[in-house]
Image (cartoon, helix red, strand yellow):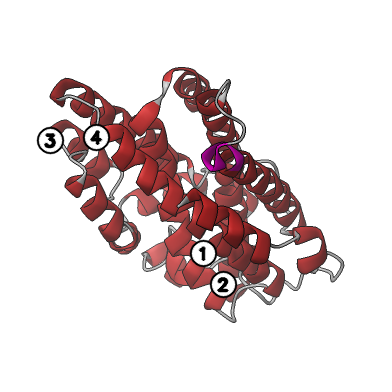
Amino acid sequence: MTRRLLDSAETLSYDPVQEVDWDTPLDTDHHGASPEWSTLYGTPYWAEMTPEQQRELTRQEAASVASTGIWFEMILQQLMLRDFYGKDQTDPAFQWALTEIADECRHSIMFARGAAKLRAPAYRPRRLVLELGRLFKTIAYGESAYAAILVAEEVLDVMQRDWMRDERVAPFVRTINNIHVVEESRHMKFARAETKRRLAASGRLRRRISALGTSIAAYFIIDSMVSPSVYANAGLDVRRAVREAKANEHHKSMLRSSCAGLMEFLASAGLLTREATWFYRRANLV
């Protein structure tokens, strides 16, 4: 499989520096993401906002999602480097790991430039989550590492497939999303295969521990995707926006729908235990 992934990377990869229109000024008549994916879409607050405010909010939310993507891609790169450290360099799997890491570096730079073009600040997870991420990248291994990678990539994938097809979204953002979707499809195939392969050698206790660790990682990834600061930067009342976003059943439904395939895979792999399901429910993924 890894040889096929390497061949695919050689024939279907993009250079964001060349592919993305970085020079055209931001057109504020466009959204940064499909409005239906906004955390406030369908709420009374959304109905009160002007179209300009709605567009600005989706631009800030898209930048926050991109920033969260950068944070987890940095964790991902370290997990893979640690996993393949000292292994056979002639193995296609080793070479694929380095290819994926190179992809993630380019994606992170692309996301950073995209967020800057959206006129957004550097959104970061809160300090506790940053430190938990530091711990996770240090201790996660085997199936728990690859399953967590899969969770992060699958959630972004469904969102971005919607955004890249939506003509209301800024053209340069759609290009970024398209690049990420195409290249991440290979990463997800590898993560699924590695998760299954590592689980084949795991016992019942290890499987339950891995399931719990993956679900906790998923909770913090989803919880960090949209920073509360986006509401202030969109000129909204932060307290009201956070309150209505947390109660927004439409957004919760979008998240659950986006993760249906992922949850099916985790269940088939034995990683959807009762304890893990509690965290997935908290993250609105089931």
Please give the range of residues in magenta.
91-95
Please say if the residues under marks 2 and 1 sit with CB atoms less than 8 Å apart: yes
* Element at label 3: helix
Residue flagged by tag 2: what amino acid is it?
Met
Q: What residue is pinned by disc 4?
A: 200
Q: In this orientation, does residue 272 appear?
A: yes
Label whose residue precedes the other's in the sequence (2 or 3): 2
Crowd around label 3: few <14 · some 14–19 · many ≥20 (10 Å): few
Label whose residue precedes the other's in the sequence (4 or 3): 4
User: Separation of disc 2 and disc 1 at Cα?
Assistant: 6 Å
Q: What residue is pinned by disc 3?
A: 274
Quick one: which residue is furthest to the right in this view?
A: 23
Q: In this orientation, does residue 49 appear?
A: no
- The reply, left or right, for residue 268 in relation to residue 16 is left
Residue flagged by tag 4: what amino acid is it?
Ala
User: Separation of disc 1 and disc 4 at Cα?
Assistant: 32 Å
User: Separation of disc 1 and disc 3 at Cα?
Assistant: 30 Å
Q: Nearer the viewer, residue 251 or 181?
A: 181
Mark number for residue 164?
2
Q: What residue is pinned by disc 1?
A: 160
Crowd around label 2: few <14 · some 14–19 · many ≥20 (10 Å): many
Relative height, residue 173 to residue 129 (above, below)? below
- The reply, left or right, for residue 241 in relation to residue 253 is right
Relative height, residue 268 to residue 170 (above, below)? above
Residue 275 occupies quadrant: top left
Front of the two marks 4 and 3: 4
Label whose residue precedes the other's in the sequence (2 or 4): 2
Residue flagged by tag 3: what amino acid is it?
Arg
Please say if the residues under marks 1 and 4 sit with CB atoms less than 8 Å apart: no
Is the stretch drawn in magenta largely helix, strand or loop? helix
